[in-house]
Amino acid sequence: MTSNVGGIDRVLRIVAGLVLITLAATGVIGAWGYVGVVVLATGVFSFCGAYTLLGLNTCPMKPAEEEHAK
């Protein structure tokens, strides 16, 4: 499993996931807020299956990968 979620994207996913879970747990929003668990997991593990399907990647390349790509 290669990381495809990087930096700012990762932080935003973690924060959004925690906010959704908290709002659902306190009853402010409905049970759909527990979708925040998926959002949180994608941020924690730096991997998003939807990004893979769409060919997206917000994770910067490592120097060794740049050398190998040439």
Image (cartoon, rainbow, N blue to C red):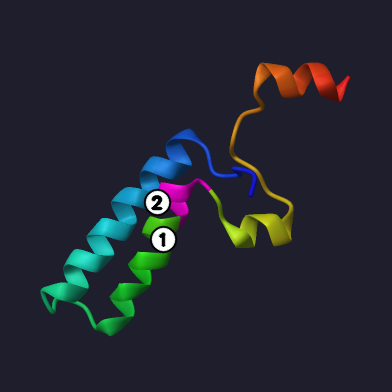
Q: How crowded is the residue under tag 2: few (<14 C-alpha within 10 Å), some, or many (20+)?
A: many
Quadrant of image for the C terminus = top right
What residue would you read off at disc 2? 13
Q: Is residue 60 above or below residue 35?
A: above
Residue type at mark 2: give it.
Arg
Q: Residue at x 62, y 62 (%)?
A: 50
In percent of width and height, residue 45 lies at 47, 49
Q: Earlier in the sequence, mark 1 or mark 2?
A: 2
In percent of width and height, residue 20 lies at 27, 65
What residue would you read off at disc 1? 39
In percent of width and height, residue 48 lies at 56, 56
Q: Residue at x 18, y 69 (%)?
A: 23
- Majority secondary structure of magenta residues: helix
Q: How crowded is the residue under tag 1: few (<14 C-alpha within 10 Å), some, or many (20+)?
A: many
Total numbered badges shown on the rendered structure: 2
Residue 12 left/right relative to 56: left
Q: Residue furthest bottom?
A: 31
